[in-house]
Image (cartoon, rainbow, N blue to C red):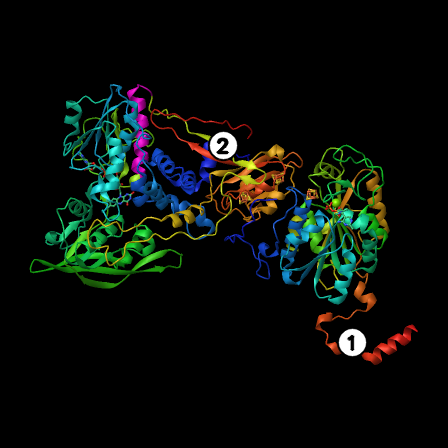
Amino acid sequence: MKPTDVSDPQYYHRVVDCQWACPAHTNVPEYIRLIAQGRYTESYLLNRESNVFPGILGRTCDRPCEPACRRGRIEAKPVAICRLKRVASDYRGDITGQLPTAPEQRNGKRIALIGCGPASLTVANDLAPLGYELTIFDKLGETGGLMRTNIPKFRLPPRVLDEEIDVILDMGVDLRLGHEITSLEAFLDEHDYDAVFIGSGAPKGKDLDIPGRQEAEPFIEIGITWLESVAFGHVTEIEGRVLIIGVGNTAMDCCRTSKRLGATDIKVMGRRGRRHFKASPWELEDAEEELIEIVENHSPKEFVLENGKLKGMTFAVHEWVTGEDGKERQEPVGEVFLPADRVILAIGQEAAFPWVERDIGIEFDEWGMLRVDKTTFMTTRAGVFVGGDAAWGPENIIWAVEHGHQAAISIHQYCRGLPIEERPPVGLNLISQKMGLAQWSYSNYYDFGLRAKMEHVDLSTRFESLDIEVEKGFDLEQTLEEVERCLNCDIQTHFTDHLCIECDACLDICPVHCLTITHNAEEAELRLQVPAPATNLDQPLFASGELPQTRRIMVKDEDLCIHCGLCAERCPTAAWDMRKFEFLQPYAGRSIEPVEELTHV
Amino acid sequence: MSSITKPLIVTRKLERNALGLTRLDYEGEMSTLCAGCGHDAITAGIVQAFFDLALPPHRAVKLSGIGCSSKTTAYLVSQGHGLNAVHGRMPAVASGANAANRSLTYVGISGDGDSLSIGLGQLCHAIRRNVNMLYVLENNGVYGLTKGQFSASTDVGSKSKRGASNQEGPIDPVLLALSLGATFVARGFSGDKEQLVPLLMAGLQHQGFAFVDVLSPCVTFNDHEGSTKSYTFIRKSRQEAAGFVPYQAEIATQYGAGSVQPITMHDGTVLYLRKIDEDYDPTDRAGAFSYVSERQAKGEIVTGLLHIKQDGGDMHDRERTVATPLRDLSFDELCPGTAGLDRLMDEYL
Ligand SMILES: Cc1cc2nc3c(=O)[nH]c(=O)nc-3n(C[C@H](O)[C@H](O)[C@H](O)COP(=O)(O)OP(=O)(O)OC[C@H]3O[C@@H](n4cnc5c(N)ncnc54)[C@H](O)[C@@H]3O)c2cc1C
Ligand SMILES: Cc1ncc(C[n+]2csc(CCOP(=O)(O)OP(=O)(O)O)c2C)c(N)n1
Ligand code: SF4
Ligand code: SF4
Ligand code: SF4
Ligand SMILES: [Mg+2]
């Protein structure tokens, strides 16, 4: 195996599991340490750098970081990364004066942003400080896109939305609400923008084409449209027995909203088993806590009407059996009729571009989606960029944010006549955390505490109105315990091979047995040489260069390392050192600034 | 010293032995020795040997004298019994304990100062008695605990950290043991567990006194240039004569069948000896003595299993000690009574 090149920023980046999994590469361990030190405002601002909406995301993020969290591989549950983000937002002080501002003197370039969701807002956030003149158009009368129209207020209070959106708009963005773009061709002809960003989302809810659909129309709602009507106060009640078809995020918000609008009996109908549900486990738990029934293995067959009134639906019921080949198969076991007064369809959504002409140089793919370059986010028409759900279909807020950052970089290049394929480089800082003999700048002890449980508003009061936020946020005591669960994966075990005297002290002390010194071999073989064999192939294996005394090499399995620093503490020569790794990401107009070059690798 | 104690983390990858125990069950307190001390690696080796042999930790007895090396009994098998004897006096305590209860596993840990200076006489007699125990001499060529004075194993010409050169000839623990008729003599190196752990495992299974001299660099006082007990010097001068194959399964895969020789131990277990040097016969005591001393004259340090004698007869055989631990004997069995005592007295009068 070749010696690992740790000067490549992506190597150590990958070790920081949460940051690696976060689409925007939020520096999670650092923000958690700032919270631990009571520096909530700094923690908030650090979050804002990469994810722009810490208060919103601290409540609603899809949190791909949590399933990735190292803690989840050591014990059962990951660090409550997302809710700690909310802590930074809840406890922060005044940040005015610490936010980016737009310069007095504009740079003369005019950019149009279509849609006022998180994708467009991120582009605006990045470009406004560079002097761009930005205009955001949205067909609706309010800002925020799906964050406002579809995420219910009991999960995301409007005040949090307003606060974080206003920070961006206050940089002098020209906001045109209630302004729908109905023809992109006309729009491009009429205005002479230097670049256009399409952040129009994926606003079309999918329909269910089964017998009875037409006749049952008055009793059927399309999930995302219905949620929007609720958000704007056009719908204030739903009565009787409600069936929700689909078990994704939208279904979860629909069922919990129904509960608050007066429905008496709510069932969420899943076609497959629980393992396959699109909704996150925590969403399912939250719905079940509200006594909503989630039904598995039921495929909708027919809407049943009587005298023009909906009576209910029939479902084909399946069972999953494991065949001889070890594969799971669906087997029909019967049919049931479930009575219902209303049905909400929550089976997915898609982007739709009836307002984009097909002959204006913008190519579409076979599914009617725009052809978008994966790195530059530009369409096939120069100067027209896309991001968020509009780019490749529905994702989530944090992906929309990351798309926005990348598109902003492209727009900035484009407007300066620079090639947009040329991306500014990422980089790293790596700084020793040694404070003295066996003393480190971070809390390196492994804390055995269990994941803090989010407190919820009492079931007896939470349904009184639609806008009672259910989650209470962590109190200080919970916060202090939860921050200690973070393993500080960004504090890297950094190895300098020529210093090692092969005393074995590090190998022997390591609590998770992830180190070995051995003769070089193929990676697959080295993986078995580690005392606790490195069988998780998703995790990298570190290999050093040859050690001076025996020409063997140091091998480390990154999988279970708890970053306790004991290897470095027991090393007599400081061949192991604990160094804080900072992943440096460029943003539009802001290239990276490494403060310390990696001296010996 | 470390600022935190090692957290006991049970991960999905933690291996279990025949008793269902993990390596953690054989560990002890956090070491307070200097970072990089060879003694810590030996501790880890003993832990590994106990784990691999699936010895019940609560039936281990850890005995030592005084010194950095002697401190290490606290860092392993915390469920075992233990005693830090007066400097150099561990062998006497080990003999007594062994006489009182032969059903336990005895491990003595000592240093070159503890065993070859102040405790030399004690060691010699324990060897002669063939006390049934594993005796590990953690040999760093200095008095580590008292800050680096030359010890009885320091080679002539070896330099102290301050540059002084040792003038007195050393006692070689291996030659000493061979000349006293030890029934199991081996030498290992703290920096090579692949060799060390099988030696320790064989020593634990040996019936009688299993003497293992382990070269163990003192990083703080004896790991500099000019020292003959430094990591670099040992690695340069070390030769292996014979060793053990830890697991039978490895015989076919890793070693040629011809170079492996089975040895049946007292309790019937079979150990597999693996020869490195074809001419070397570890059962020939005189041959071993001359082999080691000849190589030594050439500046080579011979390691591995150097001598083994299976039917030596240990202390219990010779003294005809009672097989039942004394604590399990009834008062009547333990106390001969007035009449019995009178008879005994008559024998001496
Ligand atoms: C019910 C539901 C719950 C969700 N919950 C979460 C969650 O908890 N966490 C999470 O991370 N994600 C969640 N999502 C997904 C998330 O809301 C979206 O992925 C995200 O908002 C996409 O951002 P965007 O900027 O691409 O577009 P959007 O937020 O969809 O914004 C697009 C905007 O463009 C406007 N627009 C569209 N066409 C035009 C036009 N022609 N002219 C002018 N304006 C136009 C629309 O009115 C809209 O305001 C949820 C989605 C749904 C449906
Ligand atoms: C009776 C007595 N004499 C002297 C000492 C001081 N003393 C403590 S440890 C030691 C030497 C230990 O050397 P060694 O056995 O080689 O152990 P190391 O520290 O090198 O492992 C001495 C002389 C003592 N504790 N007791
Ligand atoms: S920091 Fe070092 S000692 Fe601690 S788990 Fe990681 S490799 Fe092992
Ligand atoms: S503790 Fe340091 S010197 Fe010793 S083996 Fe580990 S890295 Fe090498
Ligand atoms: S002084 Fe020497 S023998 Fe003692 S602990 Fe330190 S390195 Fe080990
Ligand atoms: Mg010593």
- Residue A198 in picture, x, y percent from top left: 23, 31
- Which region shows up in magenta? A398-418
Decide: is B166 above or below A240: above
In this image, A227 relative to A13: left or right? left
Q: Is residue B336 magenta?
A: no
From the viewer's side, name the closer residue of B261 and A23.
Answer: A23
Q: Mark 1 falls on what kind of element?
A: loop
Q: Quadrant of the C terminus of chain A?
A: top right
In this image, A218 relative to B328: left or right? left
Q: Quadrant of ligand 6?
A: top right
Q: Are marks 1 and 2 in contact (CB under 8 Å)?
A: no
* Alpha carbon distance from label 1 to label 2: 73 Å
Q: Which residue is mark 2?
A: A430
From the viewer's side, name the closer residue of B273 and B28.
Answer: B28
Q: What amino acid does circle 1 point to?
A: Cys
- Residue A352 in picture, x, y percent from top left: 20, 38
